[in-house]
Amino acid sequence: MLFELRDVGLTRGGRAVLDGVSAAIPAGAAAIVGPSGSGKSTLLRLLNRLADPDSGEIAYRDRSLDGYDPLALRREVALVPQLPALLAGTVESNLCYAASLAGKELDAPHCLRLAGLGPEFAERDVARLSVGEQQRAMLARALAQQPGALLLDEPTSALDHGARDAIEAALAELRRELEISVVLVTHDPEQARRLSDWVVRLEAGRVVGCGALAEVLA
Protein backbone atom coordinates (compact mmCIF):
# COMPACT_ATOMS: atom_id res chain seq x y z
CA MET A 1 0.00 0.00 0.00
CA LEU A 2 1.35 3.46 -0.90
CA PHE A 3 -0.35 5.41 1.89
CA GLU A 4 -2.54 4.39 4.81
CA LEU A 5 -4.35 6.89 7.01
CA ARG A 6 -5.83 5.80 10.32
CA ASP A 7 -8.24 8.09 12.18
CA VAL A 8 -6.39 11.25 11.12
CA GLY A 9 -7.59 14.52 12.60
CA LEU A 10 -6.46 18.13 12.15
CA THR A 11 -7.93 21.29 13.64
CA ARG A 12 -7.23 24.86 12.57
CA GLY A 13 -8.69 27.91 14.28
CA GLY A 14 -11.01 25.76 16.34
CA ARG A 15 -12.45 24.09 13.23
CA ALA A 16 -11.95 20.42 12.32
CA VAL A 17 -10.36 20.49 8.85
CA LEU A 18 -9.97 16.69 8.88
CA ASP A 19 -12.10 14.55 11.16
CA GLY A 20 -11.32 10.88 11.74
CA VAL A 21 -9.98 10.29 8.22
CA SER A 22 -9.18 6.65 7.51
CA ALA A 23 -8.29 5.61 3.98
CA ALA A 24 -5.95 3.42 1.97
CA ILE A 25 -4.27 4.65 -1.20
CA PRO A 26 -2.58 1.96 -3.30
CA ALA A 27 0.33 2.47 -5.67
CA GLY A 28 -0.73 3.64 -9.11
CA ALA A 29 -3.01 6.56 -9.91
CA ALA A 30 -5.30 7.91 -7.19
CA ALA A 31 -7.44 11.02 -6.81
CA ILE A 32 -8.64 12.87 -3.73
CA VAL A 33 -11.96 14.40 -4.77
CA GLY A 34 -14.34 16.78 -3.06
CA PRO A 35 -15.79 20.28 -3.05
CA SER A 36 -13.86 23.38 -2.06
CA GLY A 37 -13.15 23.43 1.66
CA SER A 38 -13.49 19.67 2.13
CA GLY A 39 -9.88 19.25 3.29
CA LYS A 40 -8.36 17.84 0.08
CA SER A 41 -5.25 20.04 -0.09
CA THR A 42 -4.69 19.77 3.65
CA LEU A 43 -4.74 15.99 3.37
CA LEU A 44 -2.26 16.09 0.48
CA ARG A 45 0.16 18.21 2.52
CA LEU A 46 0.09 15.63 5.30
CA LEU A 47 1.33 12.94 2.93
CA ASN A 48 4.83 14.40 2.74
CA ARG A 49 4.86 16.13 6.13
CA LEU A 50 4.44 19.70 4.98
CA ALA A 51 2.05 19.54 7.92
CA ASP A 52 1.48 16.95 10.63
CA PRO A 53 -1.90 15.77 11.96
CA ASP A 54 -3.09 16.48 15.48
CA SER A 55 -4.15 12.86 15.88
CA GLY A 56 -4.07 9.54 14.08
CA GLU A 57 -1.33 7.99 11.99
CA ILE A 58 -0.19 8.06 8.38
CA ALA A 59 2.07 5.43 6.83
CA TYR A 60 3.99 5.49 3.54
CA ARG A 61 4.86 2.07 2.15
CA ASP A 62 4.02 0.42 5.50
CA ARG A 63 6.24 2.75 7.53
CA SER A 64 4.90 5.53 9.75
CA LEU A 65 5.66 9.01 8.44
CA ASP A 66 7.05 9.82 11.89
CA GLY A 67 9.94 7.50 11.05
CA TYR A 68 11.01 9.54 7.99
CA ASP A 69 13.19 12.61 7.97
CA PRO A 70 10.82 15.26 6.52
CA LEU A 71 13.30 16.54 3.92
CA ALA A 72 14.20 13.03 2.78
CA LEU A 73 10.51 12.17 2.57
CA ARG A 74 9.77 15.22 0.41
CA ARG A 75 12.43 14.12 -2.07
CA GLU A 76 10.79 10.68 -2.27
CA VAL A 77 7.23 12.06 -2.24
CA ALA A 78 7.33 15.24 -4.32
CA LEU A 79 4.48 17.76 -4.17
CA VAL A 80 3.56 20.05 -7.05
CA PRO A 81 1.47 22.90 -5.59
CA GLN A 82 -1.61 24.44 -7.13
CA LEU A 83 0.13 27.75 -7.88
CA PRO A 84 3.52 27.71 -9.65
CA ALA A 85 6.43 28.63 -7.35
CA LEU A 86 9.50 28.58 -9.54
CA LEU A 87 12.82 30.14 -8.53
CA ALA A 88 14.03 33.14 -10.50
CA GLY A 89 16.21 32.12 -13.44
CA THR A 90 15.87 29.57 -16.20
CA VAL A 91 13.83 26.40 -16.28
CA GLU A 92 17.06 24.37 -16.30
CA SER A 93 18.40 26.16 -13.23
CA ASN A 94 15.23 25.16 -11.39
CA LEU A 95 15.70 21.54 -12.46
CA CYS A 96 19.37 21.60 -11.43
CA TYR A 97 18.44 22.93 -8.01
CA ALA A 98 15.90 20.15 -7.43
CA ALA A 99 18.24 17.41 -8.66
CA SER A 100 21.08 18.67 -6.44
CA LEU A 101 18.83 18.66 -3.36
CA ALA A 102 17.99 15.03 -4.04
CA GLY A 103 21.58 14.07 -4.90
CA LYS A 104 20.53 12.98 -8.41
CA GLU A 105 22.10 13.42 -11.82
CA LEU A 106 19.97 15.67 -13.99
CA ASP A 107 18.72 14.62 -17.42
CA ALA A 108 16.99 17.89 -18.24
CA PRO A 109 15.67 16.94 -21.73
CA HIS A 110 14.15 13.76 -20.28
CA CYS A 111 12.42 15.60 -17.42
CA LEU A 112 11.14 18.28 -19.79
CA ARG A 113 9.81 15.72 -22.25
CA LEU A 114 7.98 13.85 -19.50
CA ALA A 115 6.40 17.14 -18.45
CA GLY A 116 5.28 17.89 -21.99
CA LEU A 117 7.94 20.52 -22.77
CA GLY A 118 10.51 20.58 -25.56
CA PRO A 119 14.29 20.79 -24.89
CA GLU A 120 14.26 24.46 -25.96
CA PHE A 121 12.48 25.30 -22.68
CA ALA A 122 15.64 24.57 -20.69
CA GLU A 123 17.05 28.06 -21.35
CA ARG A 124 13.74 29.91 -21.03
CA ASP A 125 13.42 32.47 -18.25
CA VAL A 126 10.64 31.27 -15.96
CA ALA A 127 9.25 34.84 -15.83
CA ARG A 128 8.44 34.56 -19.54
CA LEU A 129 6.46 31.32 -19.31
CA SER A 130 2.69 31.11 -19.53
CA VAL A 131 0.85 29.75 -16.50
CA GLY A 132 0.44 26.38 -18.24
CA GLU A 133 4.15 26.28 -19.09
CA GLN A 134 5.03 27.19 -15.52
CA GLN A 135 2.89 24.33 -14.25
CA ARG A 136 4.67 21.89 -16.57
CA ALA A 137 8.04 23.32 -15.48
CA MET A 138 7.00 22.66 -11.88
CA LEU A 139 6.23 19.08 -12.85
CA ALA A 140 9.62 18.75 -14.57
CA ARG A 141 11.32 20.12 -11.46
CA ALA A 142 9.58 17.53 -9.29
CA LEU A 143 10.62 14.77 -11.71
CA ALA A 144 14.26 15.94 -11.51
CA GLN A 145 14.28 14.55 -7.96
CA GLN A 146 13.36 11.10 -9.34
CA PRO A 147 10.63 10.62 -6.71
CA GLY A 148 8.70 7.44 -6.04
CA ALA A 149 5.41 9.31 -5.77
CA LEU A 150 4.01 12.59 -7.07
CA LEU A 151 1.43 14.64 -5.18
CA LEU A 152 -0.44 17.06 -7.45
CA ASP A 153 -2.64 19.78 -5.95
CA GLU A 154 -5.25 20.91 -8.50
CA PRO A 155 -2.60 21.07 -11.25
CA THR A 156 -4.99 22.39 -13.92
CA SER A 157 -7.42 24.56 -11.94
CA ALA A 158 -6.00 27.87 -13.23
CA LEU A 159 -5.63 26.75 -16.85
CA ASP A 160 -7.73 26.98 -19.98
CA HIS A 161 -8.94 23.79 -21.66
CA GLY A 162 -5.98 23.56 -24.03
CA ALA A 163 -3.39 23.90 -21.27
CA ARG A 164 -5.37 21.50 -19.07
CA ASP A 165 -5.38 18.89 -21.82
CA ALA A 166 -1.61 19.30 -22.28
CA ILE A 167 -0.98 18.74 -18.56
CA GLU A 168 -3.25 15.69 -18.50
CA ALA A 169 -1.52 14.25 -21.57
CA ALA A 170 1.88 14.77 -19.92
CA LEU A 171 0.69 13.01 -16.76
CA ALA A 172 -0.64 10.06 -18.75
CA GLU A 173 2.63 9.79 -20.70
CA LEU A 174 4.90 9.92 -17.67
CA ARG A 175 2.89 7.16 -15.98
CA ARG A 176 3.28 5.02 -19.09
CA GLU A 177 7.04 5.54 -19.05
CA LEU A 178 7.89 5.65 -15.33
CA GLU A 179 7.09 3.38 -12.42
CA ILE A 180 5.72 6.27 -10.40
CA SER A 181 2.58 6.66 -8.31
CA VAL A 182 0.45 9.79 -8.60
CA VAL A 183 -1.98 11.19 -6.03
CA LEU A 184 -4.06 13.98 -7.56
CA VAL A 185 -6.26 16.48 -5.73
CA THR A 186 -9.15 17.70 -7.85
CA HIS A 187 -12.62 19.17 -7.39
CA ASP A 188 -13.58 17.75 -10.81
CA PRO A 189 -14.91 14.15 -10.82
CA GLU A 190 -14.45 14.00 -14.60
CA GLN A 191 -10.74 14.73 -14.24
CA ALA A 192 -10.52 12.01 -11.61
CA ARG A 193 -12.14 9.62 -14.10
CA ARG A 194 -9.60 10.55 -16.78
CA LEU A 195 -6.49 10.30 -14.61
CA SER A 196 -7.06 7.85 -11.76
CA ASP A 197 -7.98 4.28 -10.90
CA TRP A 198 -8.62 4.80 -7.19
CA VAL A 199 -10.57 7.57 -5.46
CA VAL A 200 -10.87 9.02 -1.96
CA ARG A 201 -13.93 11.28 -1.64
CA LEU A 202 -13.97 13.95 1.06
CA GLU A 203 -16.83 16.07 2.32
CA ALA A 204 -16.45 18.49 5.24
CA GLY A 205 -13.20 16.82 6.31
CA ARG A 206 -14.59 13.29 6.37
CA VAL A 207 -14.17 10.34 4.02
CA VAL A 208 -17.46 9.53 2.32
CA GLY A 209 -16.03 7.07 -0.20
CA CYS A 210 -12.77 5.22 -0.79
CA GLY A 211 -12.11 2.55 -3.36
CA ALA A 212 -11.88 1.72 -7.04
CA LEU A 213 -12.89 4.52 -9.41
CA ALA A 214 -15.89 2.64 -10.82
CA GLU A 215 -17.28 2.07 -7.32
CA VAL A 216 -16.75 5.49 -5.76
CA LEU A 217 -17.67 7.60 -8.79
CA ALA A 218 -20.36 5.31 -10.19
Image: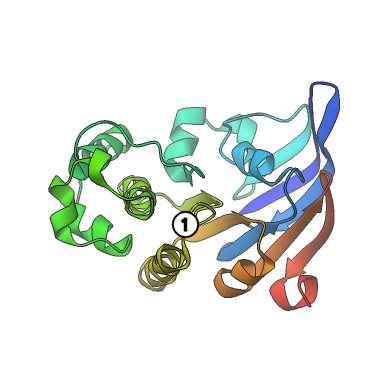
- Residue in the picture at 35% in, 71% down: 177
The quarter in which the N terminus is drawn is: bottom right
Residue 28 falls left or right of residue 148: right
Residue position for label 1: 159
Q: Tag count in the figure? A: 1
Q: Position of residue 136 (x, y in %)?
A: 35, 54
Residue shown at the point (62%, 44%) measured from the top left: 44
Quadrant of res 111: bottom left
Q: Residue 205 in the image: x percent, y percent?
A: 81, 43
- Tell which residue pokes out farthest to the front in this image: 160
Query: Can you say whether 91 is above or below 170 in the image?
Result: above
Q: Is residue 98 above or below residue 217?
A: above
Q: Quadrant of the C terminus?
A: bottom right
Asked if residue 26 can be seen in this view, the reply is no
Q: Position of residue 67 (x, y in %)?
A: 59, 31
Q: Is residue 97 visible?
A: yes
Label 1 SS: loop
Q: Nearer the viewer, residue 76 or 95?
A: 95
Mark 1 residue type: Leu
